[in-house]
Image (cartoon, grey):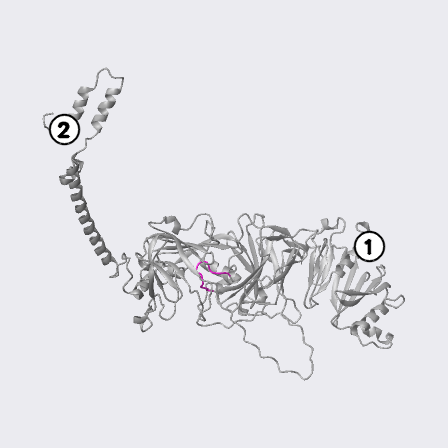
Amino acid sequence: MNGRPLTDARISEALRAHVPQTAPAGLRERIVDAAETTTQQRALPLFLGALTEADPVARRRSMLIAAALLLAVAVASAAAVGAWRLLQRDPIDELSLEPPADVPAFVLSSYEWLPQLPPLALTWHDSDSAKGRIYVDRSGAVRFDRFTSAEAAEPASYRILSPDHRISGMAPVESEPVWVEQGHEAIGEDPRVFLRTVLSADEGPGCEMERDSSEVGNDTVAAGWRYVGLENVAGRPTHHVACAGDLWIDIETRLILRTQGPAVDDAGQPIPVEFTEVTEIAFGEQPTALFEPPEGPARISMEEYTAYICVRDLPNEMAPGISDCPSTGEAEATPPPEPSPTPMPTAPPDPSDCAVPSSDPSEPIGPLAWTPESLKGDWPAPVRLEPAGGGSVQPMPLTYLDPTGDNGSTAFPCVDIRWVTADTSEVHVRLVSKPPPEVDPTEQWIAYGVVTDEDGDGVPDWRYGIDNMPADAVEKGPPRRGWRTNLHTGQTEAGPGLRDPLFLNGGGFQSGLPTDSADWEPDATFRFGGAIETTQGSQGWGFELDMPFYTWASVIVNGRVVATDYAPDSGWLVATRGVRLGGTFLLEDPFLNLSMTVPEGWTTRSANELSRVTCGDLGRHVGPDESYRADCARVAFDVIGDPLEWVDPCENTIEPPLESRFDDFVTCVASRGREGNGYGGAIIASENVTVDGYRGKHFEYSPDTRSVGCPYDCGDVWILDVDGVLLMIGSLPTGDLDGDVPKKAVKAEIRQMVESIHFEH
C-alpha cells in the first residue's frame, strides 16, 4: 500500500486482479458485482472515530467523552420540548409526576381540555358489566359504541357526533339494525366534551368538575378535591384525586381514565362501589369509515326514529338519558266521594275515551303536524319496520287477540287494539276505547288502517287507512276520510271512504267507524270486496284479501306520534276462503264480556253471531259476497234488556208471580214452548245448567223447521243469569246437515262451545 486512501473503485480493481481466471462458471461475475455494490466502512468523524481504535485505553477514553456530549444534547432537547409543551398547554406541567400544585385547577382541566383531545380509541367497562368503546377523530367527531355485554365483540348500537355537532348512528328498530340519519337540530358543544357522559364522577358542593359561567363564586368551585397519589391506569400515569367520588386523571391529556363512587352512604353505611374504568387506550389516527354511514342497513330519519321510540317508550340510543317524547302528564288525583248514607249500586267502569290534551304553547310543534295538505297524503309516520327476509305468516284465527296497553301510552286507549277478526273480504278492528266523535286533527290526529303484502315477499306494498279531518272540510257525512298509499311509489289516493266503496286504480275498500251514540262499539271496519246494486243489477267490487296483512292504529298530538299499536306486533295474518281456524271468540260491550273457545270451521257472522262455514264441500263454493248466506249452523248471543216483551204474554200464566226476573223469563219461555200454545214449536227437553259459575236453563226444541215458537226457530237455547243480566244463547242448525255432517255432531260441538264460556268478572 502506498498510503493513498482506498476508494471503492481501487478495491474493486484489486479484487478483479486477484480473481482466478479458472474459477467456476459465473463466480467471477458474482464477485465483481459484489465488489462494485459493497461500500467500505469509513472512519467515524472526530472523537467518535476513536471508538473503533484497537487500543482499549484510547477507545475507553473516547467512549466517556461521547457519553458526556450525548447527555448534554439530551438535556437541551428535553428543555426545548418542555418549553414547547408549556406554550401549548397551561403553566401546570402535565409531564411532571409530582402532585399538582393546584388540585382544583387540575380537576377542572379534565373538562376544559376535552375539546383539545387528539385522535384516539379507548375501551371502558363499569361495575354493572357494561362495556363501551369511544373513537375520537382529528376532525373532532366522536363515535360512542354500546355493547350488550362485556363479552360482546360487536356493538349493538352506536352514535356519532359529527364536527358540525349533529347526531347520527346505528340503532335497533324492530330488532334489526337501522341507520338513523342526522337530524335537523344540532348539539351546542364540541363533540369531544360529551366524553364526560361516560367518564364522570359524582358532583356536589366543592366537588364540581367544571365551571358554570352563570354562577357566582367560581373561585371556590372544586375546592373540595384532594390529592391521593400517583397510579397507573391502562398503562398511563395518572393523578388519583378524591372528593365526593374518586378520579384518576391522565397526566398528559387530562382525560379521566377511571371514576369511582363512594363506598358508604350519607349515614355512613357501606354501599356497593360503582366505577367506570378505561381498560385500553391508543392514540393515533382513526379509520374514516368509522364515522361514515355503513352500506346495507335500512335508513330512517331522526324524526322517524324518535316517533318509534316514543310510541314504545324505549331508551334513546342516539341521545342516552334525553327524551324528545311529549309528556302526557299525570291525571290530577280525584278526591274520594262523600260517604253515602245508603249503599248504592256501582256501574262497572268503562274504558275512558281518548281525552283531547291541552296544548302547551311553550312546546314547539313537531314535524308531523296536520296541515291542509294532509287531506291528500299518507299517514306521516313510517310503516312498521320488517326484519330481513320478512316476518312469519300465520293463518287468521277466529279472533286474533292483541295485548292491551302495548301502544306506548295509557292516555290513548282509542289507539290500543284489543282484537282483530277478518275474512277474505273484511277486517274488523276492536279497540279498547272508542275515539272522540269529532275532534280536529290539529288537536288529535287519529288514524286506523290495514297494511297488505300483495306478493308475499315480507315487504309491505299498500297501506289503507281512515283518519279524522276538520268538520269544515267535509261536504257530507262524518269528518273522516279514507285513503290508500302505494308504499313503493309513495302515491296516495284519498276519498270519503265511508259507506260507499273507494274505487282506487281498479281496487277499492270501504271503511268506517260507527256513529257517536251510547251503544256503538269501539271499532273500525275495512271491507275490501263485496257487491253493490246498480241499474244493471248486482255487481262485485274490490278484491279478495287472501294475502298477508296486519292492522294498525296511531295518534299524533302537537306534531308528534304519541301512541301507535300494531296487531300483530310482528309477522302477518292471512285469511283463507271457506276454511277457518278455531280460536277464541270474544263478546264485549254492549253485551256481557265473555270469551268462548270455538273449534275449526266457524267464523264471525256479525259482532254477536257465529257461523259454521265448513260443512262438507260448502266451504269451497263460498264467495266474498256470499259468506253471510253460506253456513250450516249458527250461534247467536242476545242480552235481554227488556224482558217484558217476552213476559207480557205470560203474565196471566205465572201463579204466583215470581220475584226474580230470571225465573219469570224462564217460566215464560217454557210456557211458550209447549205444544198447542198458539206459538208453534215444542220443547222436547230442558235442564238446569251452570256456565262459568252462573245458573241457567237449557231448552232443546223439536227439529220442526216450520216451528216459530222457539227463540231461534229450532235448536238449543240457553238462558243465563249473569249478575242480574239475562243472556240468551241460541243455536240454529240450517240446511240438510246430515247430508255431509251429522247434525248430532254439530249439536254436540255447540254444547261444548257454550260450556267453554268464561265471563270477565
* Residue 420 found in image quarter: bottom right
Please report whichever mark, 1 or 2, sits nearer to the chain's N-terminal start: 2
Helix, strand or loop status at disc 1: helix
- Residue lying at the far front of the rendered structure: 57
Nearest the viewer among 301 and 491 is 301
Give the amino acid type for the residue marked by disc 1 in the picture.
Lys
- Residue lying at the far top of the rendered structure: 22
Q: Quadrant of the N terminus?
A: top left
* Residue 401 found in image quarter: bottom right
Q: Position of residue 251 (x, y in %)?
A: 31, 57
Give the labeled residue for mark 2. Answer: 6
Give the crowd class for mark 1: few <14, some 14-19, many >=20 residues within 10 Å: few
Residue 656's disc number? none
Helix, strand or loop status at disc 2: loop
Q: Position of residue 335 (x, y in %)?
A: 58, 79
Q: Position of residue 563 (x, y in %)?
A: 54, 64
Magenta part of the protein: which range? 314-324
Above or below residue 5? Residue 607 is below
Residue 744's disc number? 1
Distance between the alpha carbons at the discs numbered 1 and 2: 124 Å
Residue located at (23% from left, 58% from top): 86
